[in-house]
């Protein structure tokens, strides 16, 4: 399990800030009301993969809270919690993914994307709709449609944005033995 170090706390802050900025200012409306094409989940999955599930939970929770708060309609806790659950699930599934070693091969690609797909399904097809029904008495057909559409859109955008971030991060890490001493 990855520790909650100063580096992880900074990553949570940066992850939450990036999540907020992308979710607030780069949200692309979808044909289903109150759902967007959201790029911020690629960042969140990446943060969870590199810094662990606690960082994923907190970056998703804090970032989504501030998105809702900034709109002025109140915090929609069911979706805030779902973002945190996505960060948790992605972080747990990718615990064995060690991007700090500079490797992101086909196994890493499958692990990362398997984690994000599972995370989105749990968060948006189960957690968000069920909490919408329990907390806000929303109609089931509406919230499950929103959840399924959100899961599909988020899976696609996370696969693109998150995978690009993982590849770039892994390539930026110096390989063991790649540095030589100069005279």
Image: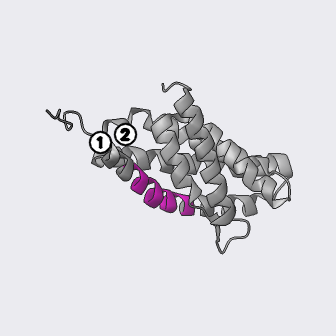
Against 143, residue 65 (above or below) is above
Q: Quadrant of residue 9?
A: top right
Depth check: 60 or 173 in front?
A: 173
> What is the spatial separation of the Cα atoms under label 1 and label 2, in whole angstroms?
6 Å
Q: Residue at x 58, y 37 (%)?
A: 10
Residue 118 shows in this picture: no
| Disc number placed over residue 5 in the picture, else none | none
Total marks in image: 2
Range of magenta residues: 153-166
Question: Magenta region's main secondary structure?
Answer: helix
In reply to whether residue 161 is colored magenta, the answer given is yes
Residue that lies at the very extreme toward the left in this rendered image: 183
Q: Which residue is mark 2?
A: 99
Q: Would residue 106 be seen by someone viewing this image from the given angle?
A: yes
Most foreground residue, 22 or 111: 22
Residue 181 in the image, given as x and y percentages of width and height: 17, 32
Residue sitting at 74 percent across and 50 percent down?
Answer: 66
Tell me if residue 125 is in the magenta stretch.
no
| The label number, if any, that marks residue 103 in the structure image | 1
Tell me whether the residue at label 1 lies in contact with that at label 2, contact meaning CB atoms closer than 8 angstroms: yes
Q: Residue at x 36, y 48 (%)?
A: 110
Instruction: Give residue 56's position: percent from left, percent from top.
Output: 57, 40
Label 1: how many Cα within 10 Å (few below 14, some 14–19, many 20+): some
């Amino acid at each position: 399990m990855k520790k909650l170090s100063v580096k992880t706390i900074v990553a949570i802050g940066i992850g939450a800030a990036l999540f907020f900025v992308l979710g607030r200012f780069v949200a692309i409306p979808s044909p289903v009301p109150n759902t967007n094409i959201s790029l911020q989940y690629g960042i969140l999955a990446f943060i969870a993969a590199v810094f662990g599930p606690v960082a994923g939970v907190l970056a998703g929770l804090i970032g989504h809270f501030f998105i809702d708060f900034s709109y002025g309609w109140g915090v929609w806790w069911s979706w805030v919690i779902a973002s945190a659950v996505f960060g948790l699930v992605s972080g747990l599934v990718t615990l064995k993914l060690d991007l700090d070693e500079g490797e992101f091969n086909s196994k890493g690609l499958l692990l990362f994307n398997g984690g994000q797909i599972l995370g989105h399904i749990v968060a948006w097809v189960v957690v968000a709709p069920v909490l919408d029904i329990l907390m806000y008495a929303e109609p089931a057909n509406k919230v499950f449609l929103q959840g399924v559409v959100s899961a599909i859109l988020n899976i696609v955008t996370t696969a693109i944005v998150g995978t690009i971030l993982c590849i770039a991060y892994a390539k930026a890490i110096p390989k063991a033995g790649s540095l030589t001493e100069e005279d």
